[in-house]
Image (cartoon, grey):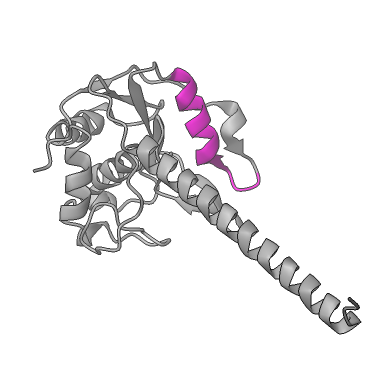
Amino acid sequence: MNIPPAAILGRYRQALSNISIIMRLIYLSLLTALLFSCNRSKAKVDKDLVLKIQPFIGTDLNEINEVADSIRKYYPKVIIASPVKLPDFAFYAPRGRYRADSLLKFLSGLAKPNETLIGFTTRDISTTNGAIADWGVMGLGKCPGNSCVVSTFRLNMTKGKNQFFKVAIHELGHTMGLPHCPNPECFMRDAEGGNPLDEEKGFCPKCKKYLHNQNWKVL
């Protein structure tokens, strides 16, 4: 039986279309499995986790002790390490400040298996933000991860202690796996380059529920 060339071409195109649909379904299945795996890893609970504050030389130890006491109201297992020097490799000479992502690597190297480290510094810190190669920040944290860092450089120091604590608890929230929150009064809101800390009142119900499952005292 002779099949017209147009019919052969039509069947060929249909076959390609079917293959394309199958490949898309396979891709979506793999993507779903990957996302599910990521969500499960974020929800992992370490009941022996210790939050260790790592001051960098130059920070006010009295302020650190007060922030530590505030953090303990949410997570009691907080210890304070002796101050250390900021690592030279993290210094970004063109802007005269320290790369926060490099500081996270440094802090991760100091952390024991059951520890999450939060570094405190008075120096300005920065990271890459999209197309902006060097974006100044108040803090940065791995999400999830075992390290975060906070700088007082951009804080309103007339309200320093309260703002210091809010940035610290925000970055610790990231290490627990919490992303930025759309609630403008939540500790986990995105600063978006500004300083909205005075508008924050606490963790929102959704973030509280997540942290409660991570053994935080938030409910």
Dominant secondary-structure state across the stretch colored magenta: helix
Q: In percent of the image, x 30 and y 42: which residue is there? A: 173
Q: From the viewer's perspective, is 155 left or right of 218?
A: right
Q: From the viewer's perspective, is 132 left or right of 136?
A: right
Q: In percent of the image, x 20 and y 53: which residue is there? A: 206
For the N terminus, the image quarter is bottom right
Q: In percent of the image, x 39 and y 48: which residue is there? A: 138
Above or below residue 150? Residue 207 is: below
From where the camera sits, is residue 82 visible?
A: yes
Measured as percent of width and height from the top left, residue 196 is found at: 29, 61
What span is colored magenta in the figure?
A: 94-110
From where the camera sits, is residue 141 visible?
A: no
Residue sitting nearer the eye, 155 or 51: 51
For the C terminus, the image quarter is top left
Q: Quadrant of residue 90?
A: top right
Q: From the viewer's perspective, is 63 left or right of 32?
A: left
Measured as percent of width and height from the top left, residue 95 is found at: 60, 48
Q: Is residue 151 highlighted in magenta?
A: no
Above or below residue 55? Residue 210 is: below
Measured as percent of width and height from the top left, residue 81 is found at: 32, 18
